[in-house]
Image (cartoon, rainbow, N blue to C red):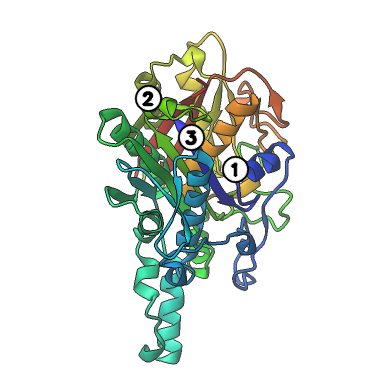
Amino acid sequence: MVTGAGVVCSLGSTAGELWDGLVAKRSGIAPVTRFDPSRFRSRLAGEVDDSAVELPPGPFRFEFKRMSAFVRYGLSAADQAVADSGLAVRAHDDAGTPRADLPPGGAVFLGVAMGGLPSIEAGVLRQENQGVRRTSPFLIPSLIPNMAASAIALQHGITDEQMTIAGACASGSQAVGEAMRAIRSGARTWALAGGAEAVTTPITYSGFQAMTALSRHDDPAGTPRPFDRRRDGMVVGEAAAVFLLEDRAHAEARGARWYGELTGYATNSGCDDITGISTPHVVRVMADALADAAVTTDAVDCVYAQASGMVRGDAAELAAVTELVSGARRQPVVTSIKGHTGYTFAANGPMNLAAALMALRHQTVSPTLKYEQTDPAFADVDIPVDARRTELRHCLINAFGFGGINASLVVSRD
């Protein structure tokens, strides 16, 4: 059961602010402020408002404030999830400082793709321009991918399992899925799981520009355009989404309330090229997740798609969804949040999960922002342009990464 949720993204710094932005059709895309983007074709990003990300007191607060943004965002989202769940017991330490103690039996599973890339770039430039002695002692701790999960564990006194999954843009979904498996198996009673990423830095733009993966539009109101016939690429986004997952019996025993139930997960490997999305493998991973959830294709109400605004990627995913439900008695609604938030790499799946959980709570599908012109190849796919009130029971959530890493989750209304 998902008993707590925390979100940091360009639409706001809570799950509620994310949802409000989605249904209000608000875009978090704006001109890049973290560096001068004038030399790049893409000059937009979905940046987090750092002033809204406040780290709570703790023994490592001094260190964490100096870490890469993905660490701070992941820690903030986890703090929200813990508070939202009500799992922690309020207490005081020997000095009288308030604290919230989590029960034993928990773990941290976090997905991170590129981690402290901005710190790496800044550290190299500082060393070359100012000399070796100017290198920060926080450089190495700040850039290693596990530091976000470590920060969460240290902040909340979690001394059991801590795992960082680096599965490219499927990392966060894999982390949530592996946490679900650990709880199902009885190895864990609860877990904090999700994904975090913040790589708005010149080398990111240089690399993706070389791959012609970034949108060239300058107007943030017009890009990225998931599924749209005029889509031309993705926009870099920053985000973290972390959830408190809990064994159902444990949640019921303490009278917890929940957003929904994680009922299915699957991950597989396969692609036609190292950066592309393979329709047959995506069909298989979605079908396997539904089988794990014991949910038929007829029962899928909504698909929260990877859809980033990439020309071939969006088409491959829609082709997969179309094939998956080809024999179903009814077709699911298919939507994407990337027009609102940008492409958030390891946080893609968890951000989709946050949106799907809120959709189940409000019985409303969020719109696909900036979708205006139908791609003739997928004219029969139901893609909402406005928030739509409808009965929702089961949502399918997709995330795919370079190297043919595919992951799907199923979340259901209890």
The residue mark sitting in front, 1 or 3, is 3
Q: Amino acid at mark 3?
A: Thr
Horizontal arrangement in the rendering, residue 239 relative to residue 17 (left or right): left
Residue drawn where x is 31% and y is 43% of the image: 104
The numbered mark, 1 or 3, whose residue comes first in the sequence reads: 3
> In the image, residue 278 lies at what x, y percent?
40, 35
Q: Say which quarter of the image contains residue 301.
A: top right
The numbered mark, 3 or 2, whose residue comes first in the sequence reads: 3
Residue beneath label 1, please? Answer: 15
Question: Against 134, is 309 above or below?
Answer: above
The residue mark sitting in front, 3 or 2, is 2
Residue drawn where x is 57% and y is 16% of the image: 331
> In the image, residue 387 lies at what x, y percent?
71, 30
Residue beneath label 2, please? Answer: 249
Badge 1: few (under 14), some or many (20 or more) residues near its Cα, within 10 Å?
A: many
What's the CA distance linking mark 3 and mark 2?
12 Å
The numbered mark, 2 or 1, whose residue comes first in the sequence reads: 1
Badge 3: few (under 14), some or many (20 or more) residues near its Cα, within 10 Å?
A: many
Q: Amino acid at mark 2?
A: Ala
Seen from the viewer's position, the closer of residues 157 and 123 is 157
Seen from the viewer's position, the closer of residues 144 and 205 is 144
Residue beneath label 3, please? Answer: 3
Disc 3 to disc 2: CB gap under 8 Å: no
> In the image, residue 166 lies at what x, y percent?
34, 51
Per the image, label 1 sits on a secondary structure element best described as helix
Q: Quarter of the image containing the N terminus? A: top left
Residue drawn where x is 39% and y is 49% of the image: 111
What's the CA distance linking mark 1 and mark 3?
13 Å
